[in-house]
Image (cartoon, grey):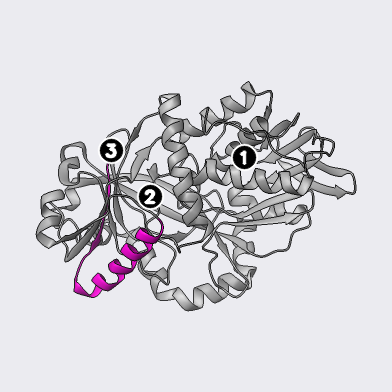
Amino acid sequence: MGQNVPMQNVVVVGAGIVGLAVARQIARSLPDSVVTVLDKESVVGAHQTGHNSGVVHAGLYYQPGSLKATLCRRGMSLLREYTAEKAIPYSAVGKLVVAADEDEVLALREIERRSILNGVPGLTWLDGSQIRELEPHVTGAAGLHSPSTAITDFGAVARAYADDVVSAGGELILGAAVTGISRTPDGVTVRTTGPSIRADHVVICAGLQSDRVAEMAGDGDEPAIVPFRGEYLDLIPTRRDLVNGLIYPVPDPGYPFLGVHFTRRIDGGVDIGPNAVLALAREGYRRSDVSRDDLADALRWPGFRSLAREHWRMGIGEMAGSLSRRLFVRRAQRYVPELTINDVTAGGAGVRAQAVNRDGSMADDFRIHHLGSVTAVRNAPSPAATSSLAIAEHIVAEIAEHEGFEPRQQDAVG
């Protein structure tokens, strides 16, 4: 270790928050490296990063010992320091996970157990009356409060990462879609709609397009990305006092989506949602957005067909909530009974890159594939934004080990 010729050129495909964090870490820690970030969009963070809820997760739900659990805890600490350094708004508003009835209390206890094993600080178990003391308009049989769960502006974080890359001598090439990746014994050639670039190593952080770009580099077809659109309602300004922090349901352990919840935004707004409906385009933020190629890819994938057979009732329910605001509000009233349809207005939407295995199971943990001189991030769902700096550390350490040298030691974020 430490004796080989230093890596010269590293290309990162994807200018979302994970790709930019990886590029930043490469620029700071790999000896004499020159990093180039490619993205087909004209701005950074155009998709999942730019449509993020802004929640900085503390690590409540994740399987202890998983990458999600370890990198979320590390990432939250690094992100808190980073936002303070860069003067990016960050507020520990806290999260309350609510068991709406006695049937959900046992599942909430399991979340508490995982949270403790994951090292989540300051947890408090609440009964129904104690919930009201914390959140006067929220009802439930029991609650688990995480005071360190926070909110921030992940778009601003991504832009700061991009500035760090450029300041360290890296380059961002925007508006250049990757059209091919060729691996050879002495490196990798990345072809784009703009320039072709020769690299010593390529890191693929392509989000909604991650499976397609990874396959260009010779990776397998599993897991495939199936896009799900999440739609929100917004509380009108005069009713934002219905919640103080973040109100979450007890999630269904057999389903990857958390269900309708209340999310306070860093700008003071409050979102309700999201639902989870199949998006008819990978970048389809409106119901009218349809891509025949994207839809055909989803329908052809055996894993999606298995998933649809198993969860079709849930799918119909999510579609119904998408089409009926009244039904959407009724589901939210389970936690905030005072909420009325007059208290909400149409909000935004995001698209989740859900990785689905061939057998129909949904990839839950972060998944990173190594293909010699190519590293492909195949699954980076929530809490990827929270974990971005820790994911970057993890990936760059693995690249350094593969390439045979020690990364430079750096301060945590400075």
Q: Position of residue 162 (x, y in %)?
A: 58, 29
Disc 2 marks which amino acid? Answer: Ala
**Amino acid at dot 1:** Val
Tell me if residue 141 comes above or below residue 205 in the rendering: below
- Residue numbers of the magenta segment: 93-118
Q: Which residue position is annotated with label 2?
A: 58
> In the depicted view, which residue is nearer to us: 25 or 212?
25
Distance from disc 2 to disc 3, alpha carbons, whole Å, reads 21 Å
Which secondary structure, mark 2?
loop
Q: Residue furthest right?
A: 185
Q: Is residue 219 magenta?
A: no
The circle drawn on residue 22 is: 1
Compute the Cα span from label 1 to label 3.
31 Å
Q: Is residue 158 left or right of residue 254?
A: right
| Residue drawn at x 17%, y 55% as measured from the top left | 336
> Which amino acid type is marked by label 3?
Gly
In the drawing, what numbered circle is on residue 200?
none
Q: Disc 1 and disc 2: Cα gap in Å?
A: 21 Å
Q: Residue at x 79, y 36 (%)?
A: 7
- Report crowding for label 1: few under 14, some 14 to 19, many 20 or more residues within 10 A (C-alpha): many
Q: Is residue 99 magenta?
A: yes
Ranked by sequence position, the earlier of labels 1 and 3 is: 1
State which quarter of the image contains the N terminus. top right
Q: Is residue 189 at all visible to an observer of this figure?
A: yes
Q: Main secondary structure of the magenta part?
A: helix
Residue 269's mark? 3
